Image (tube, grey):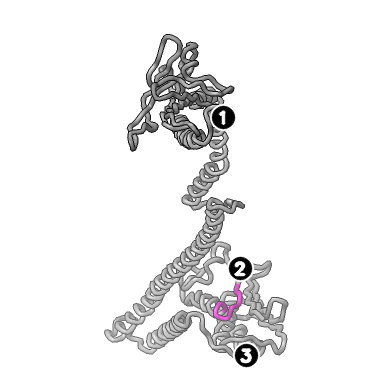
Amino acid sequence: MGACAATYVFLAWATPITYQTIAWDDLKEKTDELVNELQNVALEDSGPLLDAFLLDTGAEVVVTDTEGNLVDLPISVARSAAAAAGTGSANLSVTITAEGPGGTEEAGESDVVVTSGESETTGLFEDGFFGMGAVAVTSSDWNMPFYFAGDDTPYELTVVASLVGVNQTLEAIGRVMPYLMVLVLTISLLGALFYSRYITRPIVRLSGISQRMAGLDFSWKCGEKRGDEIGILGRNLDELSERLSGALSELKEANASLQEDIDRQRETERQRTAFFAAASHELKTPITILKGQISGMLGKVDVYQDRDKYLARALTVTGRMEALIQEMLTVSRMEKADGLVRREAVDLSDLVRQQTEQAEDLAVQREQTLSMDLAPGLTVEGDGTLLRLAVSNLLTNALTYSPPGASTRVRLQAEERGVHLSMENSGVQIPEHALPHLCEAFYRVEESRNRETGGSGLGLYLVKMIAERHHASFAICNTESGVKADIVFPQ
């Protein structure tokens, strides 16, 4: 609206000036042409030229002789300026003279004198910028000497130009101003509505989306279809959102994987610490016993005078310590290998059969029965030495913890999920609270940790480690008649 108002004021100021300048130049050119043409005709024949000039310019023409007397012109279109002044009409006249070359008078400019009956006003209009209260007229005169053809008497031509159109233009502008203001207001409102809907609203929407992005919310789509910069910005935000969402997902996955690694490392460290603590405890007791027996024998104290008896006991303690250390070394080597084992084809059927036959003597000693159901020719990829140790530990546990008269059955079959090895012994069951801890290092169900009733607590721990190194699953559970251990090797 401000731009339109400034344009309107400029037009109101510039239009009269431009109109007056154009009219001035046009009248001057036509006056020069009239003078040249009058010098080629006689006075009595000048009527048509003067009529044509008056009709074309709307100006008043006065011709005087050397004594200043008016010359009666043969015109029929307009009155002379003097006649008009004598009637008291609102015709305006101004004499503008300037000293020209050779003493002649040429056109000039002066203040406008408005003559209307008995009053006159100098200058522009008085009531308002657009002259709504009075009519302002700008006029110009030319006093030009010339001669009629065939007449040596010098005459002077005076042209009185009344530029009433300038004031009419200002008045027209003033009248149309209310309608222009309504039009400007309408255009401004439509422009504001267009701007708010087409430009401002998408920008506000994109601003809200950027705030959601700052809050790491990428569950939106801008979906801009526009081809301008706002549309490009919206599509760039969509692409940025997808990339940030993907990067954030990858980062979360990486953090989760890292957290799992950290937790696993902490658990491994905890198990290692617990393992060495338990190993120290397991070795401390037999070493203390062995030290006491040897000290008693050396000092020949009381019952220790029977050296042969206590040397045999010391040898037994030493043997258990040797077996425990061997198991600990095996665990240490397997942990150091970090899952790497020798890979070769192992005839598991033959390996299980040999270990079962070797365990028959222990079954006879404990007055138990040992049976096997082995499918022939079943092979797996792995380390034969470790697999033999795992099978031996399972058989020893089954026979050791079963009462006299119990039976142990060894079964090896091929199934859809892989090669399945199971050992089930009867006559005994494991407390439910102890089942989750059976594969922990140095854990024993028998809490007294008596060597006569329990082993080192590393047997099942080794079996689980060997199964994991061969990517096999290992589980122990109670059955209706006893306890069952299962190892499933993948195909």
Read off the residue under disc 1. Answer: 45
* Vertical side of 169 occupied by 89: above or below: above
Q: Residue furthest left?
A: 299
- Look at the numbered discs 2 and 3 and tell me whether their residues touch, using CB distance below 8 Å: no
In this picture, which residue range is highlighted in magenta?
Answer: 467-474
Read off the residue under disc 3. Answer: 345
> Mark 3, residues whose alpha carbon is within 10 Å: few (<14), some, or many (≥20)?
few
Q: Residue at x 27, y 84 (%)?
A: 299
Q: Residue at x 53, y 26 (%)?
A: 58
Residue 275 placement: quadrant: bottom left
Number of the front mark, 3 or 1: 1
x, y percent for residue 228? 56, 52
x, y percent for residue 135? 47, 19
Residue 470 within the magenta-colored segment of the rendering: yes
Could you tell me the amino acid type at mark 3?
Ala
Which quarter of the rendered picture does the C terminus lie within? bottom right
Could you tell me the amino acid type at mark 1?
Asp
